[in-house]
Amino acid sequence: MKIRVMLLCAVSICCAPLLASHKGKSVGIEGARLADVRNLDGKLYHVQGVDLDADHIWVTSVDESNRRGYLHQFNRATAKFERQVDLTDGNRYHPGGFTIGGDSIWVPVAEYKPDSSAVLVELDKRTLAVKGKFFVEDHLGCVAMTPDGLIAGNWGSRKLYVFDHARKQVRVIKNATKNQYQDIKFVDGMLVASGSLSRKTGAIDWYAWPSMKLVRSLRAGVDDRGTLYTREAMALKANDLYLVPEDGPSRLFHFVLAKP
């Protein structure tokens, strides 16, 4: 165990105390190994979503006191803040779980209440300028890109709205589980959805697409601050799982999943 902790510390100086504090107290992510924990060096509010590419980490957060919503950009190598864009759209200031696709970043920005309204905003990944957006008559808290368009979840993802490339709604899927999905991604031909079952338990679910048959589910526990890992932001790159469950000051947790 001592050798393992030392090796992990070579990756991140905060891993050893975190792993030690978890011993016997948390299941972490079922079937996964905690590989790294990084402090995001910049001001974040109530975190909502995360995604990454080779150079950057992006996080959405909502400043509830001032009714503003932001997309924040961090350097992937240093985890230091680089820039942010204000996504507030009138009464819509809640940016949710988002997704990167090609040269675009798709972010839902909604009123901060269920059964309300949202806009799905397309940003240029390089400049963070708005490329386009369209209106939806419901709160939307997360979005992912499918081969045929977009899929977005409403408040708690009780419904999933499917849009084609022309931004026309073509399908509504009812969430048959109790999992309150907060962030979703489309990975290797499957929809991956992360959310909470209770304040201290959650799960990450894999669905075959387009059948929406549940094919895999991993339980989640809490971190050393008592925060549910799947409370908010999730991204998945192959078997590398990234979570940002905490409001600012926030940490990026990197888990390596066992192959199914």
Image (tube, rainbow, N blue to C red):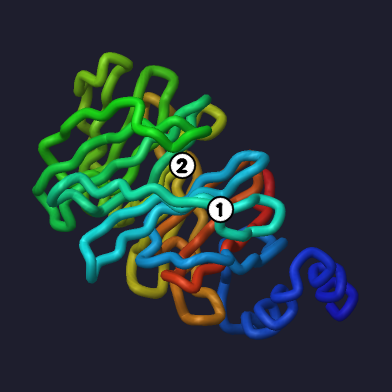
Q: Secondary structure at mark 1?
A: strand
Split into 4 quadrants, where in the image is the N terminus? bottom right
Disc 1 or 2, which lies upstream in sequence?
Answer: 1
Task: Work out whether 196 lies above or below 242.
Answer: below
Closest to the observer, 223 or 190 = 223
User: Can you give x and y, in whole percent of width and height, for residue 151 in the image?
Assistant: 32, 32
Q: Badge 2: how crowded within 10 Å, few (<14), some, or many (20+)? A: many
Q: Which mark is residue 220?
A: none
Look at 18% across and 57% down and name the residue there. 112
Q: How many marks?
A: 2
Identify the residue position indicated by label 1 in the image. 82
Q: Which mark is residue 192?
A: 2
Question: Left or right: where does residue 201 sit relative to residue 41?
Answer: left
Q: Amino acid at mark 1?
A: Glu
Q: Badge 1: how crowded within 10 Å, few (<14), some, or many (20+)? A: some
Instruction: Evaluate whether residue 158 shows in this view.
Output: no
* Residue 161 falls in image quadrant: top left
Label 1, label 2: how far apart the Cα atoms are? 28 Å
User: Can you give x and y, in whole percent of width and height, for residue 248 in the image?
Assistant: 45, 71
